[in-house]
Amino acid sequence: MISALVFDCFGVLYQGSRQYLFDITPEASHTALQDLNHASDHGFIDYGDYMAQASELTGRPVTELEEIFTREHRRNDELIAYIRTKKSEYKIGLLSNVGPQVMERLFPLEEQAELFDAVVLSCDVTSVKPHPEMYETILERLNVPAGEAVMIDDSRENIVGAEAVGMKGIVFISTDETVRNLETVGI
């Protein structure tokens, strides 16, 4: 029996800006940008440091990058509406690889409390998916056994990580397909 649904943020609840950031960064700086994203996701640097270094790598001013991040993050309102319909029946978790101060811009704290029973961000636990610690932490905070939880993520690697700790996994392709796949597992 499924008692919890766990959603990734970027690529699932929001379409992210990282690919766009790579597109505007000179190819010679892609490795440095990957390292910067890694440091941010692990919480090793704060948002201000991230933006300053990203500005250096892209050659674009911080204000322009902030506009890009705001413009390029597109909310999946259809899936968020679906979550609202399931909130009374299931525990809902958010599990995301993300740097500090980003999530509050996407989901203000009040909305996080309304939508999610537990939120685990990589920057807060200094680990990233697909490391088992991430999945174990969300399961602990939701207070559900792994076999009763479904992870929805756009990364196949992250789904493999979830399945390795005993969760069921659905690779997100589209909202409609995800809803059909959730029905297949008994939602």
Image (spheres, helix red, strand yellow):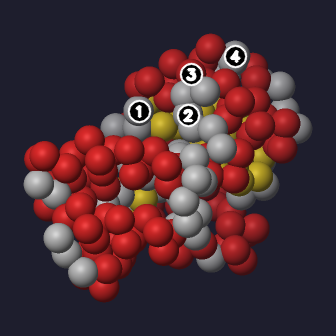
- Answer whether labels 1 and 2 touch (C-beta < 8 Å): yes
Is 21 displayed left or right of 169 in the figure? Answer: left
Front of the two marks 1 and 2 = 2
Residue visible at 61% across and 27% down?
131
Residue visible at 20% across and 65% down?
58
Residue visible at 69% across and 16% down?
166
- Answer whether labels 2 and 3 touch (C-beta < 8 Å): yes
Where does label 4 land, which residue?
Answer: 166
Q: Which of disc 3 and disc 4 is earlier in sequence?
A: 3
Instruction: Report x, y in % for residue 45.
Output: 54, 59
Q: Which of disc 1 and disc 4 is earlier in sequence?
A: 1
Q: Residues within 10 Å of mark 3 (few under 14, many from 20)?
A: many
Instruction: Report x, y in % for residue 53.
Output: 35, 65
* Residue 22 in view in this figure: yes
Nearer-the-camera pick, 61 or 130? 61
Label 3 and label 1: CA atoms lie apart by: 10 Å
- Say what secondary structure mark 1 lies in: loop
- Say what secondary structure mark 4 lies in: loop
For the residue marked with disc 1, what is the amino acid?
Answer: Ser
Where does label 2 land, which residue?
Answer: 129
For the residue marked with disc 3, what is the amino acid?
Answer: Gly
Residue visible at 41% across and 25% down?
156
Nearer-the-camera pick, 135 or 76? 135
Front of the two marks 4 and 3 = 3
Is 87 displayed left or right of 13 in the figure? Answer: right
